[in-house]
Image: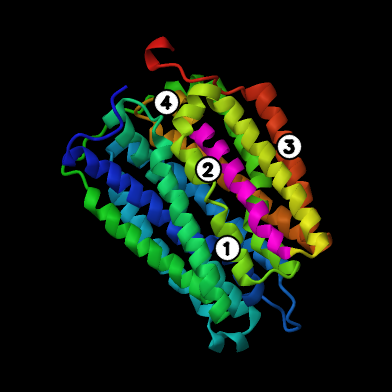
């Protein structure tokens, strides 16, 4: 494998673009995603000022479901015509527009509007958001993997690029946790989210190819790939626990008295442990393989949720900050292991399709998990949600070990 340091300016530009795409996507999502459930909790309230739990679950369900439709279509178009940057620019612009719609019910003058009107605005904005935001990360990862294969003939350096996304998440979530703690206006996080996607559209616009060349998609490769098919089942069940617990983390912390600053810092700083793990992910893959990276990551997430429940009942909300860092450790191990597994299984002309299917099964899980979470929150409370999600994650780790397996320490393409 060639030295990872690019030797010319022209080799550095694609790597830098991939890093900026990762960074600004996660700055934008870090500004908004940790606070969406809390924003809806404040905006979607009844006349008695009680959160409309089922409406909150419904908007998350619909948003996730729409990604199931748009993500594979975007992946097919990307692999067929190699136009990921054109797609990224278009999708990012529409996401910025959706953020503007979502922000309207959060302004002071909207407080007197009936719940039905506020819900329709949130629903409309989130429908637009779900259709266009969900394909973005698979396309960014595809662009990253293509750049790495073109430069190094391998995607083992993926973590070195993806760690800029972790840095962006730290910046976005921590910054807007600080802003919200001073302004007490959750709509600011939605505006920050939209602004981040405007910047992302600008970055994507600089990477257009002059010539669009269609390629043939080898569908038979996917039909024969049994490991990847079993892996997608794991992704679905694992993501029910992982995403429903993460989406409602701020909701859970708010229930137990944590302020915006603690919520923002705990979720933002959680990405700090991701940076060294991403940086050294090549060595970890070469030593452990993606099998034990994924299983270890899931088990660390289970431990984090168990400690969360204990902290909630102890009243020491500041402990959420260090314990949430376990999420960064677990998630980065799991994600880099999953990306390595997907890259080893995917045909070179199906990278976007494989990435899209990976995310589609997560979006299906997020849709199911949103309704599941709203039911648990209504009937049992947020502590029960964290505990049940931990049990789901544990079962998914057992399934992966028994039926998926993954790969051991890395083998060069020539030896496979």
- List the residue tagged with mark 2: 360
Secondary structure beneath label 3: helix
As measured in the structure, the alpha-carbon distance from the residue carrying label 1 to the one carrying label 3 is 27 Å
Asked if residue 87 lies left or right of residue 321, the reply is left
Which residue is rendered at x = 29% and y = 41% of the image? 15
Q: CA distance from mark 2 to mark 1?
A: 29 Å
Instruction: Identify the mark nearer the N-term, 4 or 3.
Output: 4
In this rendering, which labeled residue sits more in front, label 2 or label 3? Answer: 3
Image: 327 above or below 374: above
Indicate which disc residue 394 carries. Answer: 3
Closer to the chain start, of discs 1 and 4, is: 4
Quadrant for the N terminus, please.
Answer: top left
Q: Where residue 152 appears, x then y in whole percent?
A: 30, 28
Q: Which of the labelled discs sits on residue 219, or is there none?
A: 4
Q: Main secondary structure of the magenta part?
A: helix
SS of the residue under disc 4 = helix
Q: Quadrant of residue 203?
A: bottom left
Q: Give me the residue at 69% from left, 32% from top.
A: 397
Identify the secondary structure beneath mark 1: helix
Q: Which residues are magenta?
A: 317-339
Q: Report the quarter where the C terminus lies.
A: top left
Residue 326 in the image: x percent, y percent?
64, 47
Relative to 121, is 288 above or below?
Answer: above
Q: Nearer the viewer, mark 1 or mark 3?
A: 1
Q: Which tag, 2 or 1, sits closer to the chain's start?
A: 1
The numbered dot on residue 265 is 1
Residue 396, image quadrant: top right
| Mark 1 Cα shell of 10 Å, populated few (<14), some (14-19), many (≥20) | many
Residue 250 vs residue 364, the one in the foreground: 250
In primary-sequence order, the first of circles 2 and 3 is 2
């Amino acid at each position: 494998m060639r030295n990872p340091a690019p030797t010319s300016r022209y080799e550095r530009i694609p790597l830098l673009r991939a890093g900026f795409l990762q960074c600004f996507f996660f700055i934008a999502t870090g500004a908004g995603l940790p606070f969406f459930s809390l924003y809806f909790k404040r905006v979607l309230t009844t006349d008695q000022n009680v959160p409309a739990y089922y409406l909150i679950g419904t908007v998350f369900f619909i948003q996730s479901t729409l990604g199931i439709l748009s993500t594979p279509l975007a992946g097919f178009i990307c692999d067929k015509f190699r136009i990921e940057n054109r797609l990224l620019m278009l999708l990012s612009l529409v996401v910025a527009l959706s953020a503007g719609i979502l922000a309207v019910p959060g302004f002071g003058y909207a407080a007197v509007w009936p719940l039905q009107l506020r819900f329709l605005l949130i629903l409309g904005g989130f429908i637009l958001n779900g259709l266009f935001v969900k394909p973005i990360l698979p396309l960014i990862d595809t662009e990253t993997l293509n750049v790495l294969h073109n430069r190094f003939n391998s995607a083992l350096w993926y973590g070195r690029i993806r760690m800029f996304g972790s840095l962006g998440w730290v910046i976005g979530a921590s910054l807007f946790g600080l802003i919200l703690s001073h302004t007490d206006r959750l709509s600011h996080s939605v505006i920050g989210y939209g602004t981040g996607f405007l910047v992302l559209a600008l970055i994507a616009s600089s990477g257009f190819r002059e010539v669009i060349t269609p390629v043939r998609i080898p569908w038979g490769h996917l039909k024969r790939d049994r490991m990847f098919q079993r892996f997608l089942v794991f992704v679905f069940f694992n993501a029910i626990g992982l995403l429903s617990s993460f989406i409602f983390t701020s909701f859970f912390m708010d229930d137990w008295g944590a302020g915006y600053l603690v919520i923002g810092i705990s979720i933002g700083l959680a990405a700090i442990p991701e940076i060294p793990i991403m940086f050294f992910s090549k060595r970890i893959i070469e030593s452990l393989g993606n099998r034990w990276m994924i299983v270890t990551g899931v088990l660390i997430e289970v431990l984090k949720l168990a400690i969360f429940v204990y902290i909630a009942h102890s009243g020491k909300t500041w402990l959420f900050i260090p314990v949430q860092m376990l999420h960064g450790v677990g998630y980065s191990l799991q994600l880099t292991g999953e990306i390595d597994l997907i890259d080893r299984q995917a045909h070179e002309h199906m990278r976007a399709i494989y990435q899209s299917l990976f995310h589609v099964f997560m979006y299906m899980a997020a849709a199911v998990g949103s309704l599941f979470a709203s039911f648990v929150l209504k009937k049992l409370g947020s502590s029960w949600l964290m505990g049940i999600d931990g049990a789901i994650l544990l079962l998914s780790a057992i399934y992966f070990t028994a039926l998926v397996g993954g790969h051991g320490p890395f083998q060069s393409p020539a030896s496979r």
